[in-house]
Amino acid sequence: MTLRNADRMARTRWFVAGAAAMGTFIILSGAAASRQPAPRRDGTTTRTQAAKTPAPVARADDGKLRIICFGAHPDDCELRAAGVAALWTANGHHVKFVSVTNGDIGHWKMAGGPLAQRRAAEVQRCADILGSEAEVLDIHDGELLPTLENRKTITRLIREWNADIVMCHRPNDYHPDHRNVGLLVQDAAYMVTVPFFCPDVPPLEKNPVFLYFEDRFQKPNPFAADVVVAIDDVIDKKLACVEALESQFYEGGCCSGVTRLPDDPAAQATRRRDVLDRFRNRFASTADRFRRELAGWYGDEAAGGIRYAEAFEICEYGRRPTREELQQLFPFFAEDVRDAPPDGAAR
Ligand SMILES: [Zn+2]
């Protein structure tokens, strides 16, 4: 059996309902229908293989947290949550990054299937660095819509992962794919618990906590840093992910203004260093932006020394966690400030 067939079979779940009561069989194969190959621009169809063929997740509870993050493109989850992912996996918790599109227009020089395959390989390298899992859905970059079919796909992925925490973009964002990932995940936030929505995958018994990635958009409302995590201990892993996402950062992605790459090794090394410096500054800017909130989680003294951070906002539509619950979901904070909620930190 090929990997592709194995994946398709794993995703195809036949559900038989109402047989006794109705004297007939209703057979649903929604998972298979929703994950069919997307049409290509040349009229043929293909399926970009997931970065790693996802096995059905055993629902047995090993006592560890299960986190699933949805980004629009194969780099979004990594840029916004690689640090906290590395902290979780170091403690045995389970993290999965899903790119909801395949990123097939995200480069100034190449596009289509070869770029999608390249980007799937890049996020798989990041998953190897982070000790997490990666999946790339075969939806064209720039063409994601908040359809019922896509809502069902997201709902199934959250259920299959048996998630405690779900992360995504906010629905206010410059990029339509980012906005639509936010809408799709929000629209799944309640449905993951509804038994007869996508009945081919069992509903979650406990509604996860839904969180938004940090952004800088102000309208209609600015990002609220409800949870801020110091990532100094794992910054090298996060920067290694930046390096692994070569098509986007070293080569410049689609719209960075880069039109040629240096040939000589010295210039290449300089460019690599410049890219890492730029991202080091970006990850440091989150710590500076939310220094006050960091103090609420780590104490004033420790917060003053934190260089790098990631921040998350609580979505109103999933489970609304207490501060105590957040401390269990993010078991990285200073013990001695756990009982001292700061002014202005977690709401
Ligand atoms: Zn993106």
Image (spheres, grey):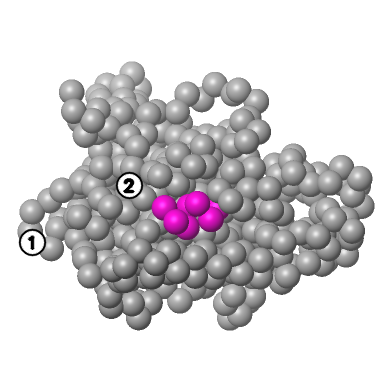
Q: Decide if residue 142 is in sight here.
A: no
Check the picture and name the quadrant holding the N terminus.
Answer: top left
Check the picture and name the quadrant holding the C terminus.
Answer: bottom right
Q: Amino acid at mark 1?
A: Asp
**In percent of the image, x 61 and y 80: which residue is there?**
218
Classified by dominant secondary structure, the portion drawn in magenta counts as helix
Q: Which residue is mark 1?
A: 42
**In percent of the image, x 64 and y 58: which residue is there?**
310
Closer to viewer: mark 2 or mark 1: 2
Q: Which mark is residue 141?
A: none
The magenta region covers: 238-244
165 over 115 or under it: above or below: above
Q: Is residue 205 magenta?
A: no
Q: Residue furthest top?
A: 20
Where is residue 119 shown, x and y percent of the image? 32, 54
Where is residue 101 shown, x and y percent of the image? 33, 57
Q: Amino acid at mark 2?
A: Ala
Q: Secondary structure at mark 2?
A: helix
Where is residue 202 shown, x and y percent of the image? 45, 31
Q: Secondary structure at mark 1?
A: loop
Label 1 packing within 10 angstroms: few (<14), some (14-19), many (20+)? few
Q: Which residue is mark 2?
A: 121
Where is residue 66 shown, x and y percent of the image? 57, 36
Label 2 packing within 10 angstroms: few (<14), some (14-19), many (20+)? many
Residue toward you, 333 or 266: 266
**In percent of the image, x 59 and y 75: which residue is there?**
216
The number of callouts visible is 2
Mark before the other along the chain sequence, 2 or 1 = 1
Give the CA separation, mark 2 to mark 1.
23 Å
- Answer left or right for 121 relative to 243: left
